[in-house]
Image (cartoon, coloured by chain):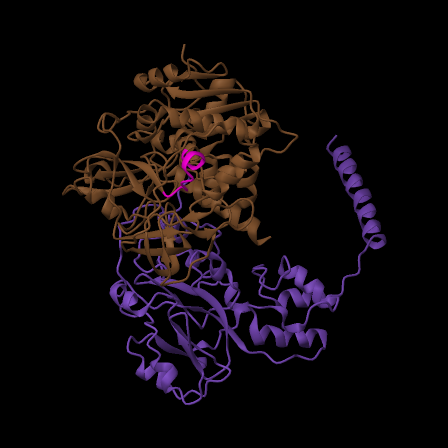
Chain colours: A purple, B brown
């Protein structure tokens, strides 16, 4: 009896194994080994910042020659080099891109005009009469950008969104999440990139009343710039990095200290592909702070 | 028997403070801030420059496109600035015109003259309404001339004048019906003429017996206009609920009242239409109820549009010492405001000031799936699920579960025992869907 069972089951197993082996041999799909290598080289976070739905989709596009080797926005130089090597293609020049928050008002610097105790989200706060700050341009500090960032590169510190340039990959998800459009992805082309950390178009008289570190549109940066890189438009200064020669006079003379700089040496990025796979990198698509099954 | 609709809530009405107060006119303020977007649709375009002199009733904003409304100066004076400011009720940043008052001798007086409706064509009425910048004064502020132009394939057979005023505390429509019933009736007849509707109802909740009496008396001689007495239930004043109660027709999901041959206009809108036809007066002032335990002398007041809340509250005795929250509109659908410089706009029906112990913050706890929000929802969405999708920013499922059908009446958040801020989350969800639609 036992023997019959063993024979039957064993026999069946053998037959199926033969069928499967034959199918495998007949229906085999040849995949370019480079595709797997490409997938391995890409960060694997599927952020879609490149415009393709996933890292796999980008890998396929790279294989087809539809995308340049530097397509991976978050991977930066290191990934682009690997991709170029795998595909045996030339790598075009790359510059460092990063998210810049155009506000530097921390909790003590900005005046609140009301008490908000609703949902912990900037978008939700903005829906209630345009936010709880006097400044209608400034950072609300409820962390929609922090929750949107898959790379743990932007944090609310003392009521202000601050970018960790070593981690920022310029994927632009925080830009989309910010209801006040304070964050933009910018090209950092100099060793010292001067930035106006303010977004306010209000007249200086009013800015002074509600913010200690707002641009008051005084124009001192414009007057003092030896190469005319600073501009004043709509009560707000801006600096053109393509013209800037890094004298730094604007930062020194700015009366409200709203001009600062980002050092490219500090912004040098850790290779993403390694870090993204560490458990520290978290990704949450939730827009609301406290998770609660409502 | 009083007519009614399914679901909804019986709320405490709180109307006793102001329902006996007749409407008083406020003096023009020193300065008004007039947002160019006080309606649904495209913002108007400023047609005055800073430093220009404007007179009362002068058009200062030209409508841009069909769904838009003209904006007029509500005081005579000098334009101080045109700049972007957060506009009420929701605080979207909108270009606004700031006018500083200055005595100018030639003031238009807007004397009313007798107008016979028979001599006006529907086009005349529509043109006059568009020129006067009239929008729905019940709160949503939809441009009126758009509602007066139904497409040919959707004829309107019944007009309903909305005098429900189901929102607690507010009494401005109630007072208008008591004090200016002839104008309300004239406005209603003008609306009927504009859309060529043969039949009309005036819907009034049965907590306003005096208004029902006045309107019934004035409609005695009108064969085709009747007063529909409605059960006092929130949100009876929502147009879909009103059509269901009066005509037993249900507006299809995502549809408009004209899909079922109905048209709803607010009493205040009818009065404004009557004014613009008889005296050529544009929409530059409105009646609002200033009420709540945080206001010393609650009242119904006629204020120029653009008047800062501070001035309106000052003329009603000012804020009490324990005042904590200022809401534009009523307690259910109103919007809490962050500053007292915020101006009164066309869609503002009331200013409600609550005291500290009435607005204590509460703690949200997990949903216990009791389903009360579903029971009370008058538009039959599932607020608890939608709130979850809004938290997860799941735009696909928000659309699948019809978040856009939500009318933000606030019933769900009112009954929620877990204190989940459902309306706030649903509004966030609606905004997510709208921004996604705009981007794609």
* Along the viewing direction, whichever of A242 and B286 lies nearer the viewer: B286
The residue positioned 33% from the left and 74% from the top of the image is A258
Q: Give the magenta part as a residue range.
A: B275-284
Q: Is residue B212 placed above or below A49 in the rendered structure?
A: above
Number of numbered callouts drawn: 0
Looking at the image, which residue is at 52% across and 45% down? B433
Residue at 53% across, 29% down: B119
Residue A182 % position (x, y): 42, 63
Q: Is residue B26 above or below residue A227?
A: above
- Residue A251: x and y in percent read 35, 81
Which of the 4 image quadrants contains residue B399? top right
Instruction: From the viewer's side, name the closer residue of A176 and B368.
Output: A176
Image spot of residue B222 (x, y percent): 46, 16
Q: Residue at x 45, y 42 (%)?
A: B132
What quarter of the picture does the N terminus of chain B occupy? top left
Would residue B279 be visible to someone looking at this image? yes
Left or right: residue B11 compared with residue A70: left
Where is residue B96 drawn, in percent x and y?
39, 55
Image height of A124 relative to B8, above or below: below
Kindly tell me whether residue B403 is visible in this rendering.
no
Inspect the magenta stretch and tell me whether residue B280 lies in it: yes
Location of residue B5 by image quarter: top left
Indicate whether residue A110 is drawn in magenta. no
Q: Residue furthest left?
A: B321
């Amino acid at each position: 009896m036992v023997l019959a069972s063993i024979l039957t089951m064993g026999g069946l197993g053998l037959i199926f194994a033969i069928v499967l082996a034959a199918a495998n041999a007949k229906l085999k799909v040849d995949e370019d080994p480079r595709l797997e290598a490409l997938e391995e080289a890409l960060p694997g976070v599927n952020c879609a910042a490149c415009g393709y739905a996933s890292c796999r989709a980008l890998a396929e596009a790279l294989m087809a020659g539809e995308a340049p080797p530097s397509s991976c926005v978050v991977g930066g130089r290191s990934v682009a080099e690997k991709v170029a090597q795998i595909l045996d293609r030339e790598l075009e020049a790359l510059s460092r891109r990063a998210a810049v928050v155009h506000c530097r008002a921390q909790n003590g610097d900005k005046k609140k005009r009301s008490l908000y105790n609703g949902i912990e989200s900037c978008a939700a706060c903005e829906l209630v009469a345009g936010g709880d700050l006097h400044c209608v341009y400034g950072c609300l500090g409820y962390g929609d950008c922090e929750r949107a960032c898959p790379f743990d590169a932007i944090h609310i510190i003392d009521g202000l969104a601050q970018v960790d340039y070593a981690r920022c990959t310029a994927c632009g998800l925080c830009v989309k999440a910010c209801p006040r459009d304070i964050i933009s992805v910018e090209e950092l082309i100099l060793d010292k990139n001067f930035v106006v950390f303010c977004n306010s178009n209000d007249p200086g008289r009013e800015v002074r009343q509600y913010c200690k570190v707002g641009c008051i549109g005084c124009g001192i940066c414009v007057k003092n710039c030896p190469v005319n890189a600073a501009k004043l438009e709509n009560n707000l200064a801006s600096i053109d990095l393509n013209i800037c020669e890094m004298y730094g006079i604007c930062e020194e003379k700015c009366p409200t200290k709203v001009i600062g700089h980002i050092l490219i040496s500090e912004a040098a990025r850790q290779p993403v592909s390694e870090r993204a796979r560490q458990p520290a990198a978290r990704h949450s698509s939730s827009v609301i702070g406290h998770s609660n099954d409502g | 028997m009083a007519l009614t609709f399914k679901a909804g809530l019986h709320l405490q009405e709180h109307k006793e403070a102001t329902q006996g107060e007749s409407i008083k006119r406020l003096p023009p303020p020193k300065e008004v801030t007039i947002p160019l977007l006080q309606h649904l649709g495209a913002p108007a375009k400023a047609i005055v420059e800073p430093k220009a002199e404007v007179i009362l009733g002068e058009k200062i904003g030209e409508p841009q496109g069909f769904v838009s409304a003209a904006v007029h100066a509500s005081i005579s004076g000098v334009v101080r600035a045109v700049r972007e400011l957060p506009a009420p009720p929701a605080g979207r940043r909108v270009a606004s015109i700031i006018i500083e008052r200055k005595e100018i001798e030639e003031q238009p007086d807007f004397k009313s003259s007798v107008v016979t409706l028979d001599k006006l064509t529907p086009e005349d009425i529509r043109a006059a309404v568009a020129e006067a910048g009239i929008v729905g004064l019940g709160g949503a502020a939809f441009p009126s001339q758009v509602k007066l132009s139904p497409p040919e394939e959707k004829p309107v057979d019944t007009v309903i004048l909305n005098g429900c005023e189901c929102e607690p505390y507010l009494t401005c429509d109630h007072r208008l019906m008591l004090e200016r019933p002839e104008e309300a009736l004239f406005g209603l007849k003008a609306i009927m003429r504009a859309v060529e509707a043969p039949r009309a109802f005036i819907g009034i909740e049965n907590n306003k017996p005096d208004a029902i009496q006045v309107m019934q008396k004035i409609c005695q001689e009108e064969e085709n206009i009747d007063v529909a007495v409605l059960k006092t239930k929130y949100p009876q004043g929502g147009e879909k609920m009103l059509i269901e109660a009066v005509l037993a027709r249900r507006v299809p999901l995502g549809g408009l009242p004209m899909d079922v041959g109905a048209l709803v206009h607010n009493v205040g809108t009818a009065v404004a239409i009557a004014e613009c036809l008889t005296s050529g007066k544009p929409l530059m002032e409105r009646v609002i109820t200033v009420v709540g335990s945080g206001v010393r002398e609650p009242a119904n007041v006629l204020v120029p549009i653009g008047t800062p809340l501070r001035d309106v509250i000052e003329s009603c005795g000012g804020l009490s010492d324990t005042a904590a929250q200022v809401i534009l509109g009523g307690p259910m659908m109103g919007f809490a405001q962050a500053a007292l410089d915020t101006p009164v706009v066309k869609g503002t029906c009331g200013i409600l000031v609550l005291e500290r112990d009435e607005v204590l913050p509460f703690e949200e706890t997990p949903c216990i799936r009791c389903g009360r929000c579903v029971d009370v929802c008058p538009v039959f969405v599932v607020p608890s699920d939608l709130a979850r999708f809004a938290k997860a920013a799941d735009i696909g499922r928000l659309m699948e579960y019809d978040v856009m059908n939500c009318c933000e009446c606030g019933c769900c958040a009112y009954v929620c025992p877990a204190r989940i801020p459902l309306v706030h989350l649903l509004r966030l969800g609606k905004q997510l869907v709208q921004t996604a639609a705009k981007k794609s």
